[in-house]
Image: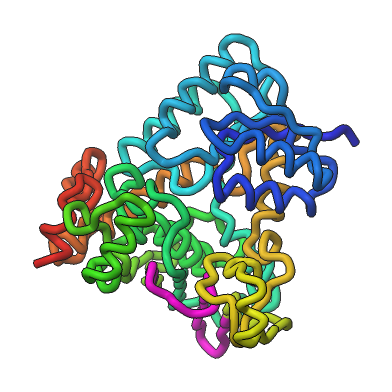
Amino acid sequence: MSNFKLGFIGAGFIAKFQARALRGVRDVSLAGVHALKGAEELAATANETGVGPCKVYPDVAELCKHVDAVAIFAPNYARIELMEQIRDAVKAGAGLKGIICEKPLGRTVAEAQRLVDIAGETGLPTAYFENQIHMKGIRAQMQQLLPQQRAMGPLGLARSAEEHSGPHEGWFWDPTRQGGGVLCDMGCHSIACCWFVLTPAGKPVTFLEPVDVSAETALLKWGLPPWRKRLLDRMGVDYGKTPAEDFATGIVSFRNPETGQIVKGQFTNSWMYDKQGLRLMMDGLGPGYAFEFNSLQSSLQIFIGDDAAEAVADAEAALEKSTASRGLLIVEPNEADLYGYVDEIEDAVAAFKQGKDGFLNFAYGLEITKLCQAAYMAAERGVRIDLTDKKIQNELKTYTSLIAQGRGAEVLMK
């Protein structure tokens, strides 16, 4: 089987994680990377770890000439410009077989729609990278509970949470560049996971119809003076002037179009989880059955005492977003596989080879963006948003949250 060549646009945190995931994917290589910074380091790592050979390219157009598919892992605010460059490269003759974009597809519904439209101009298959839907634990519970679902009916309630101590880079903290705070950053994961596991077996991922959204956003930690100063010193972002939410929670209601049954997906996300590190939690409750997933329930734990911690200080060696380097630590030996990155790459490549979209495509990413933005609207207005209302549907097309506008103080510091 011939080797499938991937090209990365961006060389930051998520690109590095995806490069790690490639070690577990057969017949796929990281063949090229283009980024404003970090490209040489990422290429060198790829070559050292055997996922290359990888070459640094000076621009998107040149990268597209030498790979089979490109993956946009660049910051949210750069997505439209990069998609336009990919489109132009394809029109100029680049023989791409597909385009990948990391979540979220857009900072607003308008941006996400624009990416869908540009992708349509290329005529190429797309894959929207929402890794948590590909997690083996989530897929395994669905398979294990398939007989119960068929006998008793589908899940009625799903609850999904992603929490950690905060992002790695300054632009993630800046709501005007990222598109909001933790709801935009991680709420898209949790909402998507709820929708996915609530969907009856054998039905498309958008089978359940979103009915309404209620939500709350808050600034609970990073708006406090000492933490605000730390954020300003470390990331150059002033939450005294342009804050974003570090906590968000809400409920999305879905209707089964065949039975009329209403099911609920509850999401909770925060940048204030100061424990072992990143935690993904999900459970689902059905009539007579249930499942529960917790990424911190690892089979491996280690203990590091004070003396040993002083000798070697590497707080994130054990787990993504870890905030400690001593004490009882949870260790995940293969985070890239645990979080679904390996499986989402395998899915996209297999689909592109057949000339098809990935399991999740850009159109799906647009729908998730709509739900996230509806959650911002619900929190901003303090009401439940009726997603079946034509007026609301039209408003969402041009809506930008106050937080994303840099006016977060008006809703977070009342």
**Magenta residues?**
267-292
Q: Residue furthest right?
A: 1
User: Which one is nearer the viewer's eye here, 208 or 183?
Assistant: 183
The quarter in which the C terminus is drawn is: bottom left
- Residue 213 shows in the view: no
**In magenta stretch: residue 276:** yes
Residue 45 as seen in the image, left or right of residue 217: right
Q: Is residue 118 above or below residue 291?
A: above
Q: Position of residue 411 (x, y in %)?
A: 14, 61
Q: Position of residue 28 (x, y in %)?
A: 79, 40
Q: Quadrant of residue 240?
A: bottom left
Q: Quadrant of residue 33?
A: top right
The residue at 53%/55% (across/down) is 205
Q: Is residue 261 above or below residue 182?
A: below
The residue at 75%/42% (across/down) is 46
**In magenta stretch: residue 103:** no
Q: Position of residue 50 (x, y in %)?
A: 83, 44
Residue 263 as seen in the image, left or right of residue 410: right
Majority SS type along the magenta span: strand
User: Which one is nearer the viewer's eye here, 14 or 64?
Assistant: 14
Q: Quadrant of residue 31?
A: top right
| Number of callouts | 0
The residue at 87%/32% (across/down) is 2
Q: Is residue 142 above or below residue 43?
A: below
The residue at 64%/23% (across/down) is 57
- Residue 165 shows in the view: yes
Residue 197 as seen in the image, left or right of residue 63: left
The quarter in which the N terminus is drawn is: top right
